[in-house]
Amino acid sequence: MIYITRREHFNAAHKLYNPKWSEEQNNEIFGKCSNPNWHGHNYNLFVTVKGEVNPDTGYSVNLKDLSVIIRKYITDKLDHKNLNLDVDFIKDVMPSTENVAIAIWNELEPHVNALNCKLHCIKLYETENNYVEYFG
Ligand code: NI
C-alpha cells in the first residue's frame, strides 16, 4: 500500500456566524471571522489516496485523473464562491475549515473509489498557519 497526494487550490469567501447567538456572542467566539460582509481565504487542499502500485504503470493512481475529479467535483464548485451561500454540498453547516474538509471528503469519496484507490486524508489549509486533516 502506498500513499500519494495531489494539491489543488481555491479561493473562497465565508463568514462564521451563528444566527442563534447575539452579535456580542458571535464577536466573542468568531472575532473578525464573523464580519457580516464576508472575508476570503486562499485555500490549499491536499487529497491523499492510497492504493497498490500497478506493475505496468508504476502508478498507484494516475494523478491527472485524480486532479480531474477534484476539480470537477470540488474546486470548480468552491473557487470564487461564497461558502455560506453558493455550494450545494456545504449547506446548513458553519463553513469552518473542519466542516468544509468533512464535506469535501463526503463529496469526493465515491469518485476516488471509482479510480481504484481509497481516500485516505483530506488536508485543508485555510491559512499558512491553520489546517485540518480528516480521515473519514
Ligand atoms: Ni475565515
Image: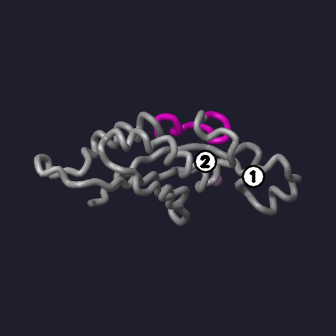
Q: Which residues are magenta?
A: 75-86
| Amino acid at the residue labelled 2 | Gly
Position above or below: 12 against 127: above
The residue positioned 11% from the left and 47% from the top of the image is: 56
Q: Secondary structure at mark 1?
A: helix
Who's the residue at 81% across and 56% down the image? 26
Q: Which residue is mark 1?
A: 34
Q: Mark 2: which secondary structure? A: strand
Q: Position of residue 113 (x, y in %)?
A: 37, 43
Residue, disc 2: 40
Tell whether position 76 is magenta: yes
Q: Is the residue at mark 2 in contact range of ligand 1, meaning its CB lies under 8 Å from it?
A: yes
Residue 130, quarter of the rendered image: bottom right
x, y percent for residue 45: 45, 51
Q: Residues within 10 Å of mark 2 (few under 14, many from 20)?
A: some
Residue in the picture at 12% in, 51% down: 55
Q: Earlier in the sequence, mark 1 or mark 2?
A: 1
Residue 58 vs residue 131, the one in the foreground: 58
